[in-house]
Image: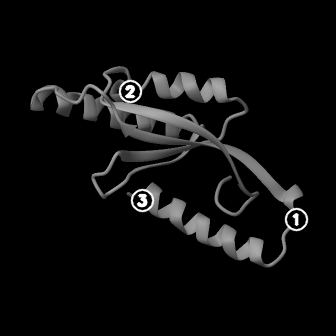
Amino acid sequence: MKLLLSFCICLLAYSASYAQGNKEDNLKPYYMVLLKKGPNRSQDSVTAARIQKEHLENINRMAESGKLNIAGPFLDEGELRGVFVFDSNSEEEVRRMVEADPAVRSGRLTYEIHPWMTQKGTCFR
């Protein structure tokens, strides 16, 4: 939740700085991952709880590695379930990290990767 709030604040800060006329050469690329409901969500409650626990542990590991800057769930219970924002030099590295996530491996979640940019120093280190 704290990471999602940080993400929203960053977007607002970026919008304000962009409106002030900052140049595009001050942008840095990131990878935004949209997590979506997967095809296999029929696990019993004990299994689903275990997968969720492992998913959260994996998020913490990716954040500690310095590669995952933002992670958080969407709160509307829709098709989109959450978001990750990675600081990585390659989409393939991001794909490997996301595919190693227990919720993705189990089929509870699927994902889309989108290259994304924001102002250097606005949100992320």
Per the image, the residue denoted by label 1 is: 23
Relative to 82, 92 lies left or right: right
Residue at (73, 60) in percent of width and height: 121
Left or right relative to 41: residue 116: right
Which scheme is used to colour this image of the protein?
one colour
Task: Judge the density around disc 2: few (<14), some (14-19), many (≥20) Cα neighbours within 10 Å.
Answer: many
Give the residue number, with chain letter if any, for mark 2.
104
Residue 116 % position (x, y): 67, 48
Q: Residue at x 67, y 71 (%)?
A: 15
Q: Secondary structure at mark 2?
A: helix
Of label 3 and label 2, which has the lower sequence position?
Answer: 3
The three-letter code of the residue at mark 3 reads: Lys
Callout 3 environment at 10 Å: few (<14), some (14 to 19), or many (20+)? few
| Badge 1 amino acid | Lys
Q: Which residue is mark 3?
A: 2
- Can you say which quadrant of the picture contains the N terminus? bottom left
CA separation in Å, label 1 and label 2: 37 Å
In the rendering, at what x and y percent does residue 96 appear?
Answer: 55, 21
Query: Relative to 35, does residue 123 appear above or below in the rendering?
Result: below
Q: Earlier in the sequence, mark 3 or mark 1?
A: 3
Q: Residue 117, labelled with which disc? A: none
Residue at (18%, 33%) from the top-left corner? 49
Q: Nearer the viewer, residue 85 or 34?
A: 34
Could you tell whether 108 is left or right of 14 in the image?
left
Looking at the image, is mark 3 or mark 2 nearer the viewer? Answer: 2
Alpha carbon distance from label 3 to label 1 = 29 Å
Give the quadrant of residue 51. Answer: top left
**Dot 3: element:** helix
